Image: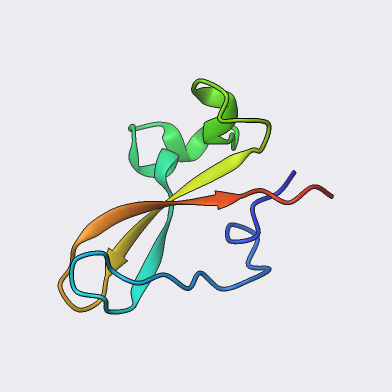
Amino acid sequence: MICPICNALIPLKVSCPDCGSVAEDEGRWSDWSGPYSPYEAAGFVGQREAEVADDAICQHAVRCIRCGAPFTVEIAAWHV
């Protein structure tokens, strides 16, 4: 399974929950969650935490380009 956002297969189109403006992807949330996170094997939230149904989820850090509000979005991984 692969994340379509991490692999640049589709653009991330998400709006800020605070002001409604366009937000931009800042990478996988796990890359921001610890000092060695970018060097660890890529995993999915559904596998690291308490399995979220049967679908693998890749959680991304996102920031609003207008107000700067940070938030996360969950991206469903593709079966290949």
The image's colouring method is: rainbow
Classify 16 as above or below 38. Answer: below
Task: Work out which residue is located at the far left of the displayed protein and give it.
Answer: 67
Q: Foreground residue, 66 or 6?
A: 66
Q: Is residue 63 left or right of residue 19?
A: right
x%, y% of residue 11? 56, 73
Q: Would you say 80 lies left or right of 11 here?
A: right
* Image x and y of residue 55, in percent: 66, 38
Compared with 69, 23 (above or below) is below
Taking the spot 26% from the left edge, 64% from the top edge, the residue there is 17
**Residue occupying the point 56% across, 30% down:** 52
Q: Residue furthest right?
A: 80
Relative to 39, is 77 above or below?
below
What quarter of the picture does the N terminus occupy? top right
Q: Horizontal and vertical percent for residue 22? A: 33, 78
Which of 42/64 is in front?
A: 64
Residue in the image at 40% along x and 44% along y: 29
Q: Residue at x 57, y 24 (%)?
A: 51
List the single residue furthest toward the front: 53
Residue furthest to the top in view is 50
The mark tally for this picture is 0
Percent across and percent down for residue 54 are 68, 31
